[in-house]
Amino acid sequence: MAVQRILLAPSAREDLQNIWDYMTEQRDGLGDEFIDEFVKITDLLLQFPELYPVVRGDIRRGIIRQFRHIFTYTIQGDAIVIARIMHSRRNTEYY
């Protein structure tokens, strides 16, 4: 089955809002730049859902290089479910 949509878990939605808030405080427009880059990567994932490696079980870890953030996701049927989004310096063992 082809992947047709991206879903954000509630925790990923909260992460995204927190990242946007923080980046916007740092520089006007930076939060929007992050969102734009994130959307580009999710568009790419729709074409290549297995682009990033499996790190545990069926959990994959992708990277937003420009901003040094990572995200975890799974492929569930026709959807990619993004679970968390965080700075790469955070302890990712909990995610």
Image (spheres, grey):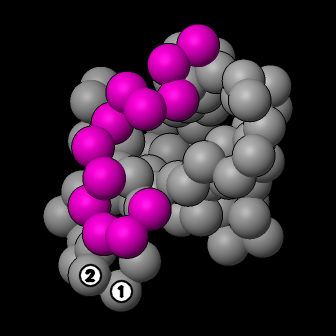
Quick check: marks 1 and 2 in contact, CB under 8 Å? yes
What is the number of the mark on residue 93?
2
Local SS, label 2: helix
Q: Quadrant of the N terminus?
A: top right
State yes or no: residue 68 in magenta. Answer: no
Out of 36 and 12, give the one closest to the viewer.
12
Residue at the image position 31 percent from the left and 53 percent from the top:
54
Residue 52 located within the stretch drawn in magenta: yes
Q: Residue at x 55, y 55 (%)?
A: 74
Q: Residue at x 59, y 64 (%)?
A: 83
Q: Quadrant of residue 91?
A: bottom left
Magenta residues, start to end? 47-58
The x, y position of residue 4, in whole percent, is 80, 25
92 with respect to 20 (left or right): left
Disc 1 crowd rating (10 Å Cα; few below 14, some 14-19, many 20+) is: few
Please determine whether, in this image, residue 62 is positioned above or below residue 36: below
Residue 81 or 23: which is nearer the viewer?
Answer: 81
| Residue 94's disc number | 1
